[in-house]
Amino acid sequence: MSGVGSGFRLALCRLRGQAALLALLLVLALLLPVGAGALLASALSPEGGFAGLTVALADEGAGEDGATRRLTAALISFSGTEGYCQWVAMEPDEARAALEAGEVTAVLLLPEGFLDSVLSGENLPVTLLTSRARPLESWLVQWLGQSVSRMLAAAQAGIYTVSERYYAAGVTEPGEEEMLLQVNLAYLGWVSGREELYDSVTVSATGTLSVTHHYALSVLAYLPLLAAPLLYPAFGGDELAAWHRRRRAVGLSPVSGALGAVAASAALLLPLVWLPLAALGGGLDGLLPAAFTAWTAAAYCGLCAVLARSAGAAGLMAFLPATLALVLAGGVLPPALLPRGLQEMVSLCPLTWARETLAAALDYPVPWPRTLALAALAALLTAVTALCFRMRVDRGEGAAA
């Protein structure tokens, strides 16, 4: 333990010159998580909430037959949609103006003869207009449109099958138009009772965390991973290599020095994590989650510093994987908006483990499996850092400070 203690003291001594930069990083850590959480919550949806979808239906070829009104009435009559989607009939120009004013979420423009094309199986394409000011709702409307398109395609496949058998059997009664009408009505009747086929589940775009906490804690877990250039003096330099060669001469392994450097780095990073977490409402309950996060970040930055030849190289080496982890953890786009393949990787990302571990201090359920996974990762990174540090000292390859 004396070797670890001396390594701890030496690391703190070598990091004294980084005090101003560490203080600046602390200020950023206090400001960025809260600011990012509030900003992105507002960007995803006004007031950070989801008020449901309002879709305007407009028929560009509408005549006196009232096709749009009849279609809107049919959509409203479908049970199960009123909780998240409201349909209104408008004229095309009126609908576009309502979209610009933020009165509707999207506009669905129907081409002339749309209803007849659905009955016949031709399926004329429709135009969907969304607003850039409401990206989350716009994405949900597009997803809803894709779901409806797939359901319609499945129905049309069934209609074609019935038509083929109708013609193959040489049936003459009822007529073709009546047959198509009856098949479509049967399909509409099935769709109107579709709630019996599904379970309704309310989900958030950011999972179990609120939008504000999701982004605030994502930034809070991400920032310490960028500290590798600041912590480089504790792991690299000719003076440090020479000191560890003298330690080795008296029987002390460089491993103990590396462990001390990781401990010192974790101690310096702890306030950068805990103080912002306390500002979010974590209080003293956030001290242990912050310690796990700081330990992981210190070991990660230490490994980058050991493998690099300069502080700048260590910073670049730490930045790229950390930023990739931020994206995979849903820290840029919310998990619900990620491609399906990436959504499956969110729970496997270490930054997700850190974010949910920190969230336990904000009265969210304690994610014990992920907290233990984070601790195991920190221990593994610490061991690898110590091993690489010893190999570097043994080769006499201490990088210039």
Image: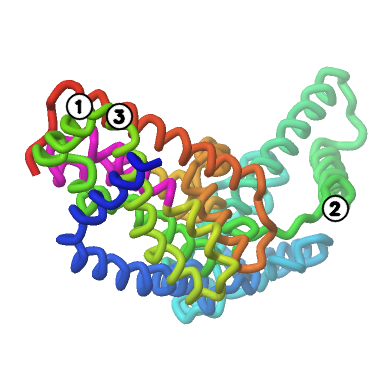
Pair 3/2: label in front: 3
Q: Dots 1 and 2: beta carbons under 8 Å?
A: no
Look at the image and give the residue range highlighted in magenta.
295-323
Marks 1/3: CA–CA distance: 9 Å
What x and y, as percent, mark residue 109?
A: 54, 61
- The part of the image, by quadrant, that contains residue 220 is bottom left
Q: Quick one: quadrant of the N terminus?
A: top left
User: In this image, 331 relative to 179: left or right?
Assistant: left
- The foreground one among 72 and 390 is 390
Q: In the orientation shown, which residue stands out farthest toward the top?
A: 168
Alpha-carbon neighbours of circle 1 within 10 Å: few (<14), some, or many (≥20)?
few
Which residue is pictured at 84% across the width and 49% down the height?
194
Residue at the spot of label 1: 249
What x and y, as percent, mark residue 151?
A: 71, 42
Which residue is pictured at 30% across the width and 42% down the height?
302
Amino acid at dot 3: Ser
Residue at the spot of label 2: 195
